[in-house]
Amino acid sequence: MSKNIVIVGFGPGVSTRVAEIFGAQGFSVAIVGRNIERLNAAVNALEAKGIRAGAFVADAGKPDDVQGALRRARERFGAITVVHWNTIGGLDAVNLLAVDPASLGQIFDTAVVGLVAAVKEALRDLRGTKEGAILVTNGGFAELNPLVDQYAVGSGSAGVALSNAAKHKLVGLLVQQLKADDVYVGEVMIAGSVRPAGSDTGIDPALVGQKFWELYQARSEPYGRVS
């Protein structure tokens, strides 16, 4: 039976490594993002490595977009095996009390709303297969630690911190809710900055991709951490 992974929030770092690692294991790769030129370039690069890949345009913060992209990926590659949620989301603000309260909802659009929409669309494929999984990239700002909170406020990342925390709680809730369906839910928390291409400073995205693969294979521990 063919296997495929849908990566929402595709970019040149962590999600590229996840695509390469899962693709090398025989998965078809559906990449989802807003920039079709970047997506097409990534598809070409993956196909050059012998990985079957396809690009699907969607805004991760819009539920209809997300579910439409997953449906198109299913039509192209067959039943979904894994969803990798790789969005950042958030609203940077040095002082959350200084922003328009109405704008704070943006923080949760990709952290919670889009992810729930993706799970709902994929669930009929994932349940009961013993291979179905939801994998979530998260950041260290999700940690409940006063020093982390202090840094988030001082660096203008309070919005991202709220997004990370909401996503972390959602992962825990999904772990519990999807147990009966035998759907694995796993999160990798990145405690630091991911190394940009061409730099030797920061966390190697390949380490994050490998951690996702290890969690997926083991299907036991829901949380991984890379620092």
Image (cartoon, grey):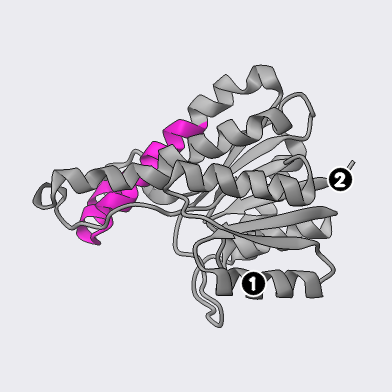
Query: Which residue extends farthest right?
Result: 1
Q: In this view, does 70 lie to the left or right of 26?
A: left
- The residue closer to the viewer here, 178 or 37, is 37
> Does 22 sit above or below residue 62?
below
Q: How many numbered markers are drawn? A: 2
Question: Which quadrant of the structure image shows residue 220?
Answer: top right
Residue receiving disc 2: 2
> Mark 1: which secondary structure?
helix
Magenta span includes 166:
yes
- Note whether residue 131 is visible: yes
Amino acid bearing label 2: Ser
Q: Name the residue under label 1.
A: 40
Q: Nearer the viewer, mark 2 or mark 1?
A: 1
Coordinates of residue 185 in the picture (x, y in percent): 61, 34
**Upstream in the sequence, badge 2 or badge 1?**
2
- Which region is colored magenta? 148-171
For the point 61% across and 38% down, the residue is: 186
What predominant SS class does the magenta segment belong to?
A: helix
Q: Residue at x 28, y 54 (%)?
A: 91
Quadrant (top left, top right, bottom left, bottom right) of the N terminus:
top right
Q: Is residue 173 above or below residue 55?
A: above
Q: Can residue 142 be seen in this view?
A: no
Q: Is residue 83 magenta?
A: no
Q: Quick one: SS at disc 2?
A: loop
Q: In this orientation, which residue lies closer to the viewer: 207 or 128?
A: 128
**In percent of the image, x 53 and y 52: which residue is there?**
86
Q: Position of residue 143 (x, y in %)?
A: 38, 42
